Image (cartoon, rainbow, N blue to C red):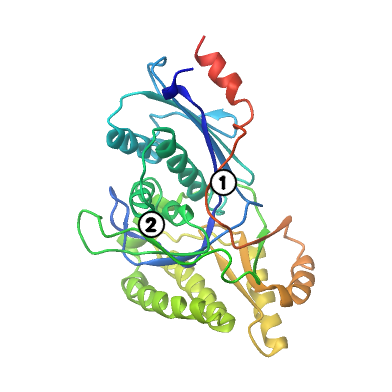
Amino acid sequence: MTISEDVYTAIATPNIALIKYWGKRNDALILPHNSSISMTLGEELNTKTSIMFTDKLKEDVFYIDGVRQDLSNNDIKERFAVIDKIRSIANTDLRVIVVSENSFPASAGLASSASGIASMVFSATNALGLDLDLKSMSIIARQGSGSSCRSLAGGFVKWERGTKRDGTDSYIRQIADANYWPELVDIVTIVSNEKKKILSRAGMRETVATSILYKVRPQYAEAACIELEEAIKKKDFEKLAMLTMRDSNNMHAVMLDTYPPLIYLNSTSLEIINAITDLNEREGGLVAAYTFDAGPNAHIITLENYESKVMPVLKAIQGIIDIKRTKVGKGPRVDKEPVRNFEKIVGDLIE
């Protein structure tokens, strides 16, 4: 292989937004109506992506979890467009082979697009020898999937909404790294592996267009970001827990207020909300916080000292099919081993 055909592999992880992004002021550039703050997760949940640029193919090739993707599909095409942006910066027209594997269900509200595009951007920029800073990479990733830009850094990350029409001031910055609050735990409770009936992009458009309640959400979320950043810096868990649950409730309220309504939570999701609320009331303080992205699966944020109180509550809920424990993650990293079957895929394509 020539230098341009070296394989580059990276692993990235999802993030869970504590103050969430839902709704765009510019669809094409994926510019949010409000800033958001997230916690990057550990590698218990991850996407591994191998990339090879080559002059031996006439078209790009993209695999996710062993399935070749249709690059004419609008949703896939929009996400894969980050590759074109990276090629433009590198001033190359080489074709590319991208193979990604997730360690968790895709499109089930667990942010597989975030870790997938973050690992793709991290791999591709490095494969082409681009020395891009975090700000520049996050601007590229944001245009493939908004939440993916937050997965390009570890620890606690803020995605600034920005105000410029060209999006040059909408990028991420790290609030604190993965080592700052090591006692924090995320218990991911999976209640469904099914793909969402309505993808987030389509759902956001409907909410912005039709929800009466959405008109006040951006202002509320922006103010909540300021409070949450202060809580993180002070390691104020009760404040973090309160803000996290209220923002999750608020986002799902505007989803329900969308017409026709967007209902991502199911009966088990509601049972989890009630169980965590009851637990906090019994304890006389906030020992755990629930939060849901656009899906029924819950993230329960707690501290190591409280895990013995939280786990029995979750295990008593029959609708939970799996529980994964993770902590604050460090962000993307290089991996020496390519994705499984990568060499076979390349071999079948390039004889």
Query: Seen from this angle, which residue lies furthest top?
Result: 351
The numbered dot on residue 5 is: none
What is the distance, in whole Å, between disc 2 and disc 1 at their CAs? 17 Å
Q: Secondary structure at mark 2?
A: helix
Q: Amino acid at mark 1?
A: Lys
The percent position of residue 263, horizontal first and vertical second, equals 51, 60
Q: Is residue 321 above or below residue 248?
A: above
- Left or right placement of residue 166 versus residue 1 in this view: left
Number of numbered discs: 2
Query: Seen from this angle, which residue lies furthest left?
Result: 165
> Which quarter of the figure has residue 40?
bottom right
Pointer 2 with pointer 1, Cβ within 8 A = no
Q: Residue at x 76, y 77 (%)?
A: 309
Q: Earlier in the sequence, mark 2 or mark 1?
A: 1
Pick the residue in front: 319 or 10: 10
The percent position of residue 27, horizontal first and vertical second, equals 29, 51
Query: Seen from this angle, which residue lies furthest bottom?
Result: 284
Q: Residues within 10 Å of mark 2 (few under 14, many from 20)?
A: many
Q: Is residue 177 above or below residue 103?
A: below
> Which quarter of the figure has residue 76?
top left
- Give the labeled residue for mark 2: 204
Q: Amino acid at mark 2?
A: Met
Q: Secondary structure at mark 1?
A: loop
The percent position of residue 243, horizontal first and vertical second, equals 50, 78
- Give the labeled residue for mark 1: 195
Q: Is residue 115 above or below residue 176?
A: above
The percent position of residue 170, horizontal first and vertical second, equals 30, 59
Pick the residue in front: 16 or 338: 338
Q: Residues within 10 Å of mark 1 (few under 14, many from 20)?
A: few
Pick the residue in front: 35 or 26: 35
